[in-house]
Amino acid sequence: MDTNSVKTYGIGELLAMARERAVPVVRGIPDTALVAPTPCAEYDVKALVNHLYQVIVQFQRLAAKEASDFGDTPDRVTGNAEWREGLALEADRLVAAWSAPGAEEGTTGGMDMPARLVGSMALLDLTVHVWDLARATGQDCPGADEAVVAELAGAVDTLAPTARKMGVFGEPAPSRRARRGSSACSREPAGIRAGGKHGGPGSSGQVGSGVGGPGIVAAGSPFSRYS
């Protein structure tokens, strides 16, 4: 038996790990904090919740190889006292969608990106934007599991060249000792920065989540990956 073998997790499993950390943060957001600013300069808390909600819903469609729409973002918060539980339910559905047989196979989205990479984009958003929400609402950093950090590091490496050309990812951070795991809360994976274009894979011709859409991040995150 090879005791040194490394387990390969499915995207559904990784999303389940991220979901366990995300939902308590979402449930901990008070109504009074919805107008607070977040590390994503273009979003206040309510807008970021709505953005994350949209990401979670649309990436369920991408898991099923269906067309997605990252255009208009519905307001699922205003006038809805149950929005926290609604987001938690959609996160469960996201996990189920990416755990379904065949979800990681082939390509998906308007740009026919590898399905597993697209799933990693959803993972990036769920991980990073929940950190944003925790920071914005005075909650403890939710952290990230080691397996999630490893998956996101690989995804960022794959997406970075195109993303930097588009001006969505910044340049790599200065060389520092790599810090991985749930205790790291530096939010600077490979120099990704806040701002930029939004949209899922292939929406409006953009690369999408983790590059131009979901997954845009600023300085400091639940995982760190310094070169």
Image (cartoon, grey):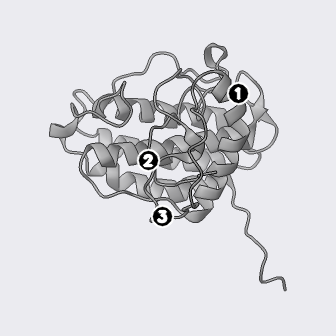
| Residue type indicated by callout 1 | Thr
User: Which of the two discs, 1 and 3, sits closer to the camera?
Assistant: 1
Q: Secondary structure at mark 1?
A: helix
Q: Earlier in the sequence, mark 2 or mark 3?
A: 3
Q: Earlier in the sequence, mark 1 or mark 3?
A: 1
Residue drawn at x 38%, y 52% is 23
| Residue type indicated by callout 2 | Gly
62 and 38: which is toward the camera: 38
- CA separation in Å, label 2 and label 3: 13 Å
Residue 162: which numbered mark, if any? 1
Quadrant location of the N terminus in the rendered image: bottom right
Q: Residues within 10 Å of mark 3 (few under 14, many from 20)?
A: some
| Above/below status of 48 relative to 15 | above
Q: Secondary structure at mark 3?
A: loop
| Residue type indicated by callout 3 | Ser
Q: Is residue 85 visible?
A: yes
Determine which quarter of the picture holds residue 114: top right
- For residue 4, side relative to residue 197 (left or right): right
Q: Secondary structure at mark 2?
A: loop
User: Which of the two discs, 2 and 3, sits closer to the camera?
Assistant: 2
Q: To which residue does mark 2 refer?
A: 220
Q: To which residue does mark 3 refer?
A: 182
In percent of width and height, residue 34 lies at 23, 34
Residue drawn at x 53%, y 64% is 181
45 and 42: which is toward the camera: 42
